Amino acid sequence: MRVSQNHHRNSIPPQEQRVALDWVGRRLRWERLLWAAASGGSACWTRRGPRPRPVTEVFDPFELQDTILGDVRDPFPELAAGRRRGAVVAGPPELFVDNDDDFEIAPGAPTFTAYSHEAVTAILRDAEGFSSSILADVVGKTVIQMDGDEHRRHRALISPALRQKALARWERELVGVVVDELIDAFVDSGRAELVRDLTFDFPVQVIARILGLPQRDYPRFQRWSIELLSGLVNWERAQAAARALDHYFGAVLADRRREPKDDLISDLSVTEFDGHRLTDQEIFGFLRLLLPAGIETTYRSSGNLLYALLTHTDQLAALRADRSLIPPAIEEGLRWEPPILFLIRNAAQDRDVCGTHIPAGAVVNVCTGAANRDESVYEDPDRFDIRRVPRQHVSFGWGPHMCIGMHLARMETRVVMNALLDRLPDLRLDPEFEPPFVQGTAFRSPPALHVCFD
């Protein structure tokens, strides 16, 4: 039997999974992972300051994955235990109550965790009572940190660039082309590792082409995108990547303002709402948000869906027989195994949520992963079922801050699934490798998906 590079993780006994949180000698505290999850992965913050590591010339894009993810295989029993304690409870998420680390996110502020679907949606819907502006000092000013009229105006300026007409053209001219090119590279070999060979690369290439970047720049664009997340282990590298991206996009944006082209950056440079246009810094902020949101979460969610289907062969067979099940399969994958488990809000006003008083100034951990498996909303919630009666999940958020790129993410995943079913109709797990698994706390995805096909 072949052993994958992650074989040592399969030796963790189930009873130890709930405390398997030794991110680099436990130096990565919960607050840093939660800030990173809430900001789409681009933040590295702790009141003790960053702990930089030496920057090396050789860069393996997968070298940071275990550190960024955490080594938790199945967080859902602990999240269910949190739900049983209450819809909203004081303190950090149940998953970490036995951890010795300091859980403070904002020193001195009371902390609460929302577990139930009702509580999570109430908090995310109430932008006046629960603000996302807490992240502004960490990731800079982007649409996710804005509230009220400012948020509505900014979202109205960005939304036209992601309209359905643009999505249809990108699907036809870009996304399908990228996916086919990646599959071409391994289709004749009879086997592949779908994370490295497909899901990791395709969102980066799609976003780069949507932005109108020249193909020669794809490698460094991908590197910068990955390095934005490396702030968890190397602050200097992440900051250098952010500066490099701003410098790079500054030149691209200046060119588009002079001579608009048929790409997203050009659309952002000319879009107008009520006499307002986006400034250069606002466009840079959107692009910095687009990288982790449009690349990182899409790669993880598509990998999670493939994991679910490959480990539930009856569901994969149903999908092969009826392609109309692809959209509900995508939604079920997002519900059952979301790429991010937590969002974060701070209470701007006193609020009572599901019987719990949350005072102004409190930090609230919004556990979307727990809400997605709430027994009061979903029948048999731990079962992966692509024929499930539709109930809206919260993996894309809820309310005014619902993910602005969710339709792009759904379209990309749909194209990937159709391409795999078309070109690899007998796709299955490779029996020569150990079974795959999903891991992670702030972020979740399979480290590897070894498959074979005839």
Image (spheres, rainbow, N blue to C red):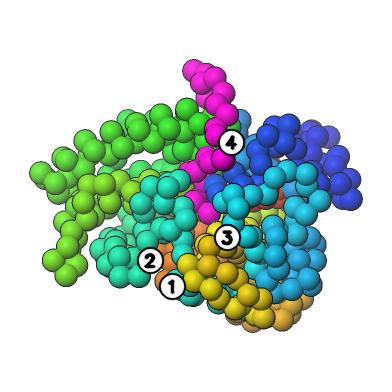
> In the rendering, which numbered label is found on residue 128?
1
Q: CA distance from mark 1 to mark 2?
A: 7 Å
Q: Would you name the residue on which mark 4 appears?
A: 48
Mark 4 neighbour class, 10 Å CA radius: few under 14, some 14 to 19, many 20 or more: few
What residue is at 57 percent from the left and 23 percent from the top? 53
**Would residue 1 be seen by someone viewing this image from the given angle?**
yes
Query: Marks 2 and 1: in contact by CB < 8 Å?
Result: yes
Residue located beneath label 2 in the image: 147
Looking at the picture, which amino acid does disc 2 mark?
A: Asp
Q: Can you identify the residue that label 3 sits on?
A: 363
| Highlighted range, magenta | 38-62
Q: Residue at x 41, y 29 (%)?
A: 240
Tell me if 447 is positioned left or right of 54 in this view. Answer: right
Secondary structure mostly taken by the magenta-highlighted segment of the chain? loop
Q: Which of disc 2 and disc 1 is earlier in sequence?
A: 1
What is the secondary structure assignment of the residue under circle 1? loop
Left or right: where 222 falls relative to 443? left
Mark 2 or mark 4: whose residue is earlier in sequence: 4
Question: Residue 41 location in percent, x, y?
Answer: 52, 46
Query: Which mark lies nearer to you, 2 or 3?
Result: 3
